Amino acid sequence: MNEQETPAQESGIFQPKAINESMIPESGAKKARKIGIALAAVAVVVLCIMVSRSLWLHPIKKFYRSMNRHDAAAMTEAFPSWLVDADMSGESMSVEAMCQVVINNLGMIAGNDGTVHALYSGYTPIEAEKLEKIQAGIEQQFQIKTKVSDGRLCAMEVTYRNTDGKEQKQIEYVTMYRINGHWCILDVPNTTK
């Protein structure tokens, strides 16, 4: 018999097992930490989903916020840069000029210090055939390669308010497009679909 072995070990009756971490009961602190980490991971995933779902609304929000600030230059950020930078001489109004007209219309509706509040109320998807036509039209007119991958006709409940508190409410429609991976608008909101 070896000095380090007990008689039970020598006879094979008792074989001690190696102790590993899974055999030691977890303390309350360890369990709480694991639960906390799991909850934090779930919260991050939920937050990412919520942010990604509302990213497409950013151009609409930018448009109406800029209208409130009477800032046509900031309003143009709701449009794709290639459209803002396009030479529209002779064909149609530039994007910035179009945005300035919108701000002037706000002045006529609600006064120079009037405000606008827009609330998103839903959308209808744009059909794939129309998206293909929009893409072909952009490529032909502006001579740039694009990919129009999604489109949504959004309904906005818009309230124009003057400084006296008088309000004018209406539904406005904004068509959003996902062009080359970025959401934007190609035209100003209007009251007809």
Image (spheres, rainbow, N blue to C red):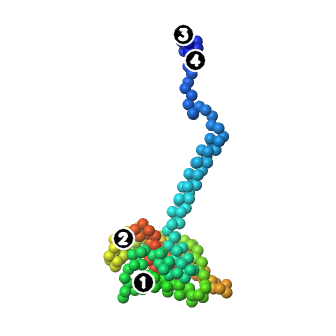
Q: Secondary structure at mark 1?
A: loop
Ranked by sequence position, the earlier of labels 2 and 4 is 4
Front residue of this view, candidates 49 and 112: 112
State the quadrant of the N terminus: top right
* Residue under label 1: 94
Mark 2, mark 1: which one is toward the viewer? 1
Give the spatial CA distance, label 2 vs label 1: 20 Å
Q: Which residue: 55% across, 82% down?
A: 70
Give the spatial CA distance, label 4 vs label 3: 15 Å
- Label 1: how many Cα within 10 Å (few below 14, some 14–19, many 20+): some
Three-letter amino acid code at the position of disc 1: Ser
Q: Are marks 2 and 1 in contact (CB under 8 Å)?
A: no
Residue 30 at least partly seen: yes
Ranked by sequence position, the earlier of labels 1 and 3 is 3
* Residue under label 4: 14
Mark 4, mark 3: which one is toward the viewer? 3
- Label 4: how many Cα within 10 Å (few below 14, some 14–19, many 20+): few
Q: Secondary structure at mark 2?
A: loop
* Residue under label 3: 1
- Label 3: how many Cα within 10 Å (few below 14, some 14–19, many 20+): few
Residue 157 at least partly seen: no
Q: Secondary structure at mark 4?
A: loop
Mark 1, mark 4: which one is toward the viewer? 1
Q: Which label was assigned to residue 146? A: 2
Taking 94 as reference, is 21 above or below it? above
Give the spatial CA distance, label 2 vs label 4: 75 Å
Ranked by sequence position, the earlier of labels 2 and 1 is 1
Ranked by sequence position, the earlier of labels 2 and 3 is 3
Q: Are marks 2 and 4 in contact (CB under 8 Å)?
A: no
Q: Which residue: 38% across, 80% down?
A: 86
* Residue 11 coordinates in the image, percent (x, y): 55, 12
